[in-house]
Image (cartoon, rainbow, N blue to C red):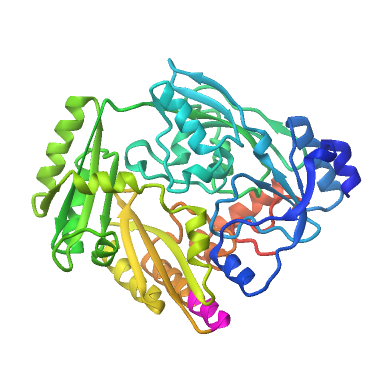
Amino acid sequence: MRKELEAIVGAAALDERAVRDLWPLGLMQERDGAERPRVLVARPAGREQVIAILRWAGANAVAVTPMGGASGVCGALAPRTGELVLDMGGFDRILALDEVNLTCTCESGVNGMVLEKQLNERGLTLGHFPSSLPGTTVGGLIATRSSGQESSRYGSIEDMVLSLAVVLPDGTFAAPRPGPRSAVGPALHQLWLGSEGALGVVLGAVLRVHRLPELVVGRGYAFKNLQAGLEAMRAVMQSGIRPLVMRLYDAEDTVFSGYDVPADACVLVVATAGLAEVAKAEAAAVQRFAAGGTDLGEEPWHRWEAHRFSLSAERLKALLDPPGAYVDTIELAAPWTVLPELHAQVKSAIAVGGLALCHFSHAYQQGCCAYFSFGGSADTEAEARAAYGRAWEGAMTAALDLGATISHHHGTGQVRARWVADEMGGWMHVWRGVKEGIDPRRTMNPRALGGTS
């Protein structure tokens, strides 16, 4: 196996090591003594090498998982002995920035923060800011169907991807299709957004970019309870305003975040952006919709800006370092009418260890994302894993019972594998048909989108 791969990529581009993403349960298992299997990792240097690797893998029944920044948190990147990982870090070129048509063509291994900084130098932005941005790649954002902190203005990754360059499992190359939109059949490239490497290897993307706003106006408001804050969010979104950021912290998360407000109050941080006169006018409108709350001025906005990327891989590992500790996040999405009950049921389910927080963000006219954080500790590793499992079981059950989605932007991987078919329903048959048609030899990531093998 090694010699055959060396013949494709060269000995220097092939090594053997333990690889996995940041799924907390996986980190907990390692803390308890489980060893990560060592697998071959190939770093292809161009399209032809990717094609050759996939053809070889299909002929030899070797499973292949593409790897970006390995910053996922769902266990989709967890190769086993005998499998192969494709390190896409060599595909790291920004090929073109079109400042007239507002597009960017780049390879899938481009780091998310590097891309954003280069766009900023031209007065542009992708507008995609997951808290993990410094550790992400464009391919990883695509594979997980990512969303970012400014999604209410710019949309999520599926709104930014105009076209993709991919290599199918049999080695077929599919190049980007032209234009801002096409009615020549379905937008088939969208199948790769959220597929977690199950359909082939993304080599690059044509992305929609935006001009940086002339002005950003941000403030905070304190509401007497969660319902009042959610009503203000709904009113803003349904008015036609597309805020740059809008995040509502429940009472516990408000305290945890250090806001000095009355007990049980919930803080809303909101910013508008664009041309100066537009940003100011929208900020004034937001202030009117938030009239039921207390105006906290600009400080909450500046505090949020300063900590927007604080949830790093290093911090997660540090939180999980003590024996018996467990911590994770669960991001769901639901209509406005469902959110209060979803909040109540999931908070109850995840409070098994004491820490149970929630904030609401990624807002739409129809609803928003509810982002839960939970944690605790147990006397033994087995008890910690059991508590962790109960939290997930309760959260997923509540989401499905209430008609919420079981993931908004982290993906599925192994952590949600049991519940994927429950949410997809009859569309699971469609997905399986797509997977079987594109990857009949099951070459690509066996732990993607509900797979656990």
Q: Is residue 80 left or right of residue 220?
A: right
Picture residue at 90% right of the left edge, 43% below the top: 4
Residue 154 is at least partly visible in this image: yes
Q: Quadrant of the C terminus?
A: bottom right
Picture residue at 70% right of the left edge, 51% below the top: 436
Magenta: predominant secondary structure element? helix
Q: Quadrant location of residue 370?
A: bottom left
Q: Give how far across and how far down residue 359 sits, in percent.
A: 31, 58
| Viewer-closest of 66 and 118 | 118
Q: Give how far across and how far down residue 281 sits, in percent.
A: 14, 32
Q: Is residue 154 left or right of residue 284?
A: right
Eyeballing the image, is 390 above or below 174?
Answer: below
| Viewer-closest of 419 and 384 | 384
Q: Quadrant location of residue 125?
A: top left
On whether residue 382 falls in the magenta region, the answer is yes
Q: Is residue 423 left or right of residue 154?
A: right
Picture residue at 27% right of the left edge, 67% below the top: 252
Picture residue at 66% right of the left edge, 64% below the top: 452
On whether residue 82 falls in the magenta region, the answer is no
- The number of callouts visible is 0
Eyeballing the image, is 206 above or below 301?
Answer: above
Residue 365 is at least partly visible in this image: no
Q: Give how far across and how far down residue 67 sits, in percent.
A: 65, 46
Q: Give how far across and how far down residue 15 sits, in percent.
A: 79, 47
In the image, the segment drawn in magenta is 380-389
Q: Residue furthest right?
A: 3
Q: Is residue 445 left or right of residue 319?
A: right
